[in-house]
Amino acid sequence: MLDIQKIRADFPILKREVNGKPLVYFDNAATSQTPQVVIDAIVDYYSNYNSNIHRGVHTLSQEATDAYEVARKKVQAHFNAKHDYEMILTAGTTHAINIVATGFTQFVTKGDEIIVSALEHHSNIVPWQMLCERTGAELKVIPMNEEGSLQMDVYETLVSKKTKLVFMNHVSNALGTVNPIDFVIKKAHAVGAAVLIDGAQATPHMKPDVQALDVDFYVASAHKLCGPTGVGVLYGKEEWLNKLPPYQGGGDMIDQVTFEKTTYAGLPFKFEAGTPNICGGIAFGVALDYMNSIGFENIATYEKELLDYATNALKQIEGLRIYGEADEKTAVISFNVGTIHPYDIGTIVDKLGIAVRTGHHCAQPIMNFYNIPGTVRASFAFYNTKDEIDIFVAAVKRAVMMLS
Amino acid sequence: MSIKEIQEEIVSEFEMFDDWMQRYEYMIDLGKDLPLIDEKYKTDKNIIKGCQSKVWVHAELKGDQLNFTADSDAIITKGIIAILIRTFSGQHPSAIIDADTDFIDQIGLKEHLSPTRANGLVSMIKQLKMYAVAYKTQLN
């Protein structure tokens, strides 16, 4: 059992008021809040050992380098990767996806196929569309069904010898659907295709084991894991990372530079050109420690309780429809009430101190599937409470009354 | 009435309400009086960019006065565009171009004025003024 009040005390922002009301923060799928230990780590870095890494012989640089590499090891341990140098620290999930999508240009040609799911965020669609434009490869889409799950029988018919790469999210950001990535990876590997899984929405709720999954690439963002913005991770199997060309040229990613030829540094530095977000990387490690100290099993159990409670309460509202009702879903509820525009509901509940996301959630293909302009999305974290859900449900009812 | 006078009238109407809920309800009511855009003008070309909801605006010159019609698929947005159109419609393009919109602050909708706000009140004002600039050249 989690002591939620004790956990809430770790998050200074949860004490603030918005529009004169206590903040109810239900936009965790966009960005999670930051516990004091992570804030302290950021302050500590800039107060005590701010300096550039991997370069200086002086003490501060050594301390910063050590802390950054310790963070990398924490990330490695968290995802259970074989080697720490398989964890490329990036500016976020989108950056991580672009490293792979750009790198694959030389492995893909006309006649090849790339498979994507219909449940993707734009950041896991556009880089691959660009790859297809560059190479002439064809993009195939695994369709979704009404409840918001992918049609795996269609996936099986799409996978063939032509398939070079399959990419999908572990969990849909708009609907919360947990995709059967185990199955997807096995089928893709059977035809020799590589798989990239976007874990941005899964990692706040579960702890993926990249070796058990046997996944080729797995990407995630720190800011959805109680860490800072502007930091993420690209896990890649060593053999793939060795094959992929560098994404950006610059300092830190080189071995020898002459004007005739440059040889690149080994992993992970080959993909980490320039001064990275050192403080952010260190804070990411601290955030993972924090979440692991709470425990992902505890988080999953408690969030399921919140999800069921909120789902039942919201369903009592007349005309309310929930989008995404897969058996396996994370603590995300996307909904509309009658024909009321999600923006209208979002505006009214904001006046009541509640933060939810409205709009298409950067997943326009899903909105097109349901033929809606967007949804209201409430997404929960382990520091939310049933009391907050009560406040939210009452606010939605009030909004509906005003708007109908 | 001049734009300034209409704005003062709107401000005094909103002053009757003491809390935000009543003000929003009144704004929603004002949306119901919006001169609706003809369906044939509800094209992508007439959508104001920068709004999370859809807002269509059409402008027509009658004599030397510019008249606006509009619609939105969101009720609050419809209220906001209705307030703007009430101040600008029937005015000379030059008056629209020169008008300030500080009254928005006074009616308690200041939070909508941020240029990064997804509802795009700033985009709406900009678009209405662009129509005025375009039609002013026709008058010259």
Image: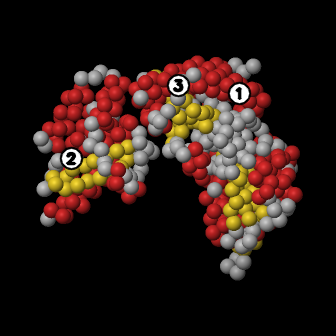
Bin the neighbour count of mark 1 within 10 Å (Cα to Cα): few under 14, some 14-19, many 20 and up: some
The answer to whether mark 1 and mark 3 are in CB contact below 8 A is no
Task: Please state which amino acid type lies under the numbered disc 3.
Answer: Glu
**Which is in the foreground here, disc 1 or disc 2?**
2
**Which is in the foreground here, disc 1 or disc 3?**
3
Viewer-nearest residue: A318 or A18: A318
Which quadrant holds the N terminus of chain A? top right
User: Same chain, marks 3 and 2?
Assistant: no
How far apart are the alpha carbons under marks 1 and 2?
Answer: 53 Å
Report the disc number at residue A318: 3
The residue drawn where x is 18% and y is 33% is B9
Q: Chain of mark 3?
A: A
Which quadrant holds the C terminus of chain A? top left
- Callout 2 secondary element: loop
Task: Please state which amino acid type lies under the numbered disc 1.
Answer: Lys
Residue A227 image position (x, y, % from top left): 64, 39
The residue drawn where x is 54% and y is 39% is A375
How far apart are the alpha carbons under marks 3 and 2?
Answer: 39 Å
Residue B84 image position (x, y, % from top left): 27, 42
- Residue that extends furthest to the bottom in the rendered view of this protein: A260
Viewer-nearest residue: A130 or A373: A373
Q: Quadrant of residue A74?
A: top right
Can you identify the residue that label 2 sits on?
B89
Looking at the image, residue A273 lies above or below residue A344: below
Q: Earlier in the sequence, mark 1 or mark 3?
A: 1
The residue drawn where x is 59% and y is 36% is A334
Residue A57 image position (x, y, % from top left): 72, 55
The residue drawn where x is 65% and y is 41% is A146
- Callout 3 secondary element: loop
In the picture, measured across the screen, residue A184 lies left or right of residue A397, that is right
Can you identify the residue that label 1 sits on?
A304
